[in-house]
Amino acid sequence: MAKLPREFYLGDTVQIAQNMLGMYLVRRMADGELLAGRITETEAYVGRCDKACHAYQYRRTNRTSTMFGPPGHAYIYLIYGMHNCLNVVTEPEGEPSAVLIRAITPLAGIAQIQRLRYGNKPMTPARRKAFMNGPGKVCKGLLLDTELNGIDLLGNQLYLCDSPADIGLPGWEPSRERLCSGPRIGIDYAEEARQFPWRFWLETEAE
């Protein structure tokens, strides 16, 4: 399968956060099953200038050390003691920056993703609407936790690709969409960085 190359993650983090929209996030389970979805919402975090970033002003801790490493690796951390968040490390090694994957549209392994999210509960309209529309939901639905922190996204367990054919969906095309941007969510502590328009998402345009 054609994974995004290392070079994809080397550029400007804010631009990469936009470029990742419409890409496919793929999780290969231990039994070989593929769980995958199309990325529909991201947020950019840039350590050198962004008070919302864990590594603001190059603050290096045990948790943030992954962000200082090579690009194209997963930075997975736990928030509120209960939700995992998946980020993609960007920019050259030593520049602590990453893109948070906030939402995906499940396209492969949907039954398994549903079980991981809801157990044996029925898929009601409310649950379907909120299926994978948050970073904690993405990690729960793809069985991602801090044990995978630092994993190389050019490996076989977790990676990004840009073709639906890579997840067994040849010829699939989304509806016509537009790229939207606005302030990030849940960063009230970040002073002026609260207003950075570094959250990006796709909206379906009316026919």
Image (cartoon, rainbow, N blue to C red):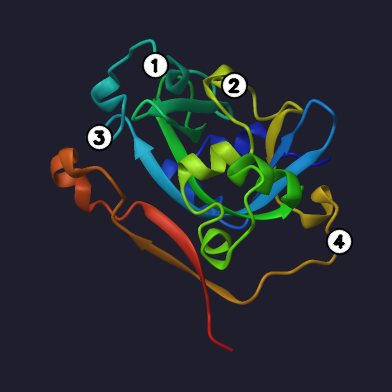
- SS of the residue under disc 4: loop
For mark 1, what is the residue? 63
Q: Residue at x 71, y 51 (%)?
A: 162
Using the numbered discs, state the Cα–Cα distance from disc 3 to disc 1 in whole angstroms.
19 Å
Report x, y in % for residue 44. Answer: 39, 44
Q: Which label number is shown at residue 170?
A: 4
Sequence-first tag of 2 and 1: 1
Please state which of the two labelled residues, at mark 4 or mark 3, is closer to the viewer: 4
Q: Is residue 152 left or right of residue 30?
A: left
Three-letter amino acid code at the position of disc 2: Leu
- Crowding at dot 4, Cα within 10 Å, few <14 / some 14-19 / many 20+, comes out as few
- SS of the residue under disc 1: loop
Sequence-first tag of 2 and 4: 2
Q: Quadrant of residue 181?
A: bottom left
Please state which of the two labelled residues, at mark 3 or mark 2, is closer to the viewer: 2
Q: Is residue 49 above or below residue 61?
A: below
Please state which of the two labelled residues, at mark 3 or mark 1, is closer to the viewer: 1
Using the numbered discs, state the Cα–Cα distance from disc 4 to disc 1 in whole angstroms.
39 Å
Q: Is residue 9 above or below residue 147?
A: below
- SS of the residue under disc 3: loop
For mark 2, what is the residue? 148
Is residue 25 in view from this perspective?
no
Using the numbered discs, state the Cα–Cα distance from disc 2 to disc 4 in whole angstroms.
29 Å
Q: Residue at x 49, y 27 (%)?
A: 76
Using the numbered discs, state the Cα–Cα distance from disc 2 to disc 1 in whole angstroms.
13 Å
Report x, y in % for residue 12. Answer: 44, 42
Three-letter amino acid code at the position of disc 4: Pro
Q: Is residue 151 above or below residue 183?
A: above
Q: Residue at x 21, y 53 (%)?
A: 195
Confirm or deny contact between disc 4 and disc 3 (CB under 8 A): no
Q: Is residue 63 above or below residue 103?
A: above
Report x, y in % for residue 15. Answer: 46, 50
